[in-house]
Amino acid sequence: MSNTTLTQLQEGLTTAYIDGTAAANLAYKPAFVSNNPEEGKKVISVIEDELMKCDQFQISVAFITMGGITPLLQTLKELEKRQIPGQILTTNYLNFSEPRALKKLQELSNVTLKMYDVDRADQGFHTKGYIFKKEEIYRIIIGSSNITSAALTKNKEWNTKIVSTEQGEIAMEIVKEFYQLWDSKYALFYDDFYENYKQKYEIIKKQREIAKRDEISSTEKYKLEPNSMQVGFITNLRRIVDAGENRALLISATGTGKTYASAFAMRELGFKRVLFLVHRSTLAKQALTSFRKVFEDKKSMGIVGAGYSDYDADYIFAMVETLHKEDNLRKFAPEEFDCIVLDEAHHSPANTYQKVMEYFKPKLFLGMTATPDKRDDGEASKNVYELFHYQIAYEIRLQQAMEEDLLCPFHYFGISDISVVTDEQMKARNISEEDFGKLTSDERVRHVIEQAKYYGYSGERVKGLIFCSRNRECEELSAKFNALGYRTIALSGDNKDKEREKAFERLAMNEEDATDEMQPLDYIFSVDILNEGVDIVEVNQVIMLRPTQSPIVFIQQLGRGLRKAENKEYVVILDFIGNYNNNFMIPVALSGDRTYNADTIRKYVISGNNTIPGASTVHFDEIAKEKIFNSIDKIKGMRSIIKESYISLKNRIGRTPLLFDFYEQGEIDPLVIIREYKTYWQFLEAVEKGKYFSKLTDHEKLILDYLSKTILSGVRPSELFLLQKLLTKKTFSVNEVQKELKRLLDYNITDLEMRESVKILQGCFTSKDEEYQKYKTIEIMDYDEKQGVRCFASYANCLLDNEFNTQVKDIINVGLARYRDKYAHGKVEQTPFVLYEKYSRRDVSLLMNCGKDMSSTMYGMSRIGDDVFIFITYHKEEAEEGKNYADGKPDYADAFEDNLIFKWDSQIGKDNSSPYMQKVLTAPRKHLLVKKSDAESSFYYMGQFDIIESVDSQKEDNSGKMKPIAKVTMKMHHPVREDLLRYLQSNISKENKAV
């Protein structure tokens, strides 16, 4: 064993058990392993990481279920491909382990499975241990977690991870104990235990189901009670009604129980006559069934439309297409109903709904939708929020619904599609026969079926939905699935309601209920008719074979599987990811993050599995990951996305939004808007064509342009605070600024920073002279140490203009909010930098008080006073043929060896004796900033480092000549965060680059 490894082990032990502030390589540090998604911690993530790094593994757990195995399947498949050997020991204790899960593990060619027979051994078996070996090092997790969904993702679990050499006493004892159990006469191989165990498991399971059915028949109605969303909604709705409002909107994620919520509300508010308006007959029947469970026979209920005409019922469930006709409306008095419920209320701006709403005068119009921002025709004027008077009774989106356990957990797998059709080709109205052939090829069908069988489903049989890009594709794929023995059907808008309803029943039914006339379906293929208004609660697998159109549509389709149902522990989502421009929308949809900040999206692809609430998990295979990163790097149509976000936000708040509204409401990141439009007034002119004309003077526009690109990011508060002071005072002292910044933001501003901040607000923070000549006229403030800060009269006059004043305040509010949220905490080692936050070269110039923007000269290395900054692009551009590297971008061997050690090559032609390297070697403080590729404009601040070795070497330049360089080994002061290291090291495959 090398001295380096021993040193790293000792440092890890020191950090874990003696001094938590000491730096250590995370790979060698013992750790506490638990579930805490808010802090990005899940037991499953640690186990997956260790599996991916090990040379061999042993697992000993009492229980194994499909819910525990399913989220590990992608990792286990990769280990099988690499033939990493594994031994898994479980038990027949309580007959809890699921035979399907055991069979799935046995099918892996690299895994040997045994079951310890506790009945014959006559002793309990409660071990929960995971042993991973890499070379001579063991990493062992021992604690409370079995391989079950809850244990690996959401339960309160306590585990400890130890790190040891193979000669370490504890590791030796644990491994010895494992092999004693493994070699015991009570530990049976799969072929020796499986059939008997499965038979016993099935008998016991049937007995439990019989007992459960007897219990359900008498307690189902008793157990029907509102969930947390429904209780909160009813409470808020009562307040709205009591305040005299006659309209309200419920915004609730698919599957959270909107229909039951409205039924409970009608009952609690005592409404005698209710109209429930839908746009499909299927929805009317489903809603009536739910209401009957709540009201039993206390209200008469009936349907209007689709051949029904129960106009006299107390509670009427009506199709809008039927009811909006004049003759049918006249059958009721305008005040006939106490409440009118509009299901799928995002359709309510349509003419048919409007005719109904204009005729009736109920005490309350209640709208319900999961997608209030979805507009069928894309018209900005169709404002659902306005229609319901901005009275939101309750709002719960997907992430919160998962946190509150209102939905069935899902296991999402992003899998690389083998079809090479682009989204433009796929969306083409007249797709070529060649491209259509690729979409429906036998090879693609085999690939999809292979993955669907491998990742499986929860329950006795698959009940799946498959979303395609066009109806013809649905029909062809359905035919090919059927030819292979599956039972499938393709549905489109051409199918009548009765045909659809029969298909839904066939998908939902159990195998034992089959008749000659009614056979179960395995899958329904469709394009978009299943996106909303379909409640097949039994769906346990959703397959996506099309590009993501939008986050809203993605969540609608994923949501088809999120309703809870008996004997359904989870739903499997298989998303086949091609080379599509819109791939970036997948992490946007899954995370619920609407900022479209590229760094936030990238982070979710890497660590979304750690942060997703509840028992749900998110996985992307490596090729799919890179396809998404590729899409993030080249996000197309950003202006359309910004406009859509603006319209939704404007509709929601009922006025023209400010930049701060975008930030506060979690909509598009203000920096993204400014990057696209330079200033917010320019954006408003572009998006409100003909309706908004800026009355700002050219001088005011110049000031806003400068402030937007210089201080909006909020990397420090000084300039923002000075501007804020000028809004109310035209002169103030330095002492006043220092005291208030300390009191309000706990920020210490030095005299140097004070002077530099004023210079920045005088237009000096530019990189070129022509830029300085342009901005030096902004004249905001002046400063001297005796008289303090003074506002220029010209700027004071600008502030008298209401529009200018509002936009300056808006920039200040966004900047200060960003500072508080991102940069106020976590600064390290008396620097102005927060570990792992992103900074541009321009930001570094500002924070280091350079006096001007030095970014144009900050390439590779920059020495500023006592500080040296190393800027690294982790993945370099590929060279043209015949060259060693891309011109101006040599392929330096810059890479992290592990969490602590970074290897860096100096510039070609610069060895240790060069002035260039002397600047690096002699700097008292050395900082490393890294970005993954040139697609990113800013760098992650990785912290300070020490140089532990720098040796002279040589490197060939593009002319074929050997030139001197220095090869430097750095040791970071802080171990690099695992998720960030994984992101930087994930490589862009050549296959993906060729696309």
Image (cartoon, rainbow, N blue to C red):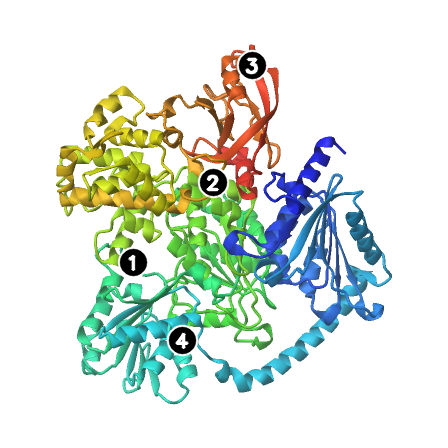
Which disc, if any, is residue 376? Answer: 1
Closer to the camera, 591 or 919? 919
Q: Residue 893 placed where, x, y %?
A: 57, 25
As drawn, which residue projects farthest toward the bottom? Answer: 298
Residue 522 placement: quadrant: bottom right
As drawn, which residue projects farthest toward the front? Answer: 786
Contact? badges 1 and 2 (CB < 8 Å): no
Contact? badges 1 and 4 (CB < 8 Å): no
Q: Which residue is mark 2?
A: 629
Contact? badges 2 and 4 (CB < 8 Å): no
Q: Distance between the Cα atoms at labels 2 and 3?
A: 36 Å
251 vs 867: above or below = below
Closer to the camera, 115 or 44? 44
Element assignment for label 3: loop
Instruction: Say whether residue 174 is left or right of residue 758.
Output: right
Q: Residue 289 placed where, x, y %?
A: 41, 80
Q: Which residue is mark 3?
A: 911
**Dot 3, how many residues are within 10 Å of its Cα: few (below 14), some (14-19), or many (20+)?**
many
Q: Mark 2 is on which residue type? A: Phe
Q: Distance between the Cα atoms at labels 1 and 2?
A: 30 Å
Lower position in the chain sequence, tag 3 or tag 1: 1
Element assignment for label 1: loop
Contact? badges 3 and 1 (CB < 8 Å): no
689 vs 496: above or below = above
> Is residue 309 visible to us here?
no
Q: Mark 3 is on which residue type? A: Asp
Q: Which residue is mark 4?
A: 260
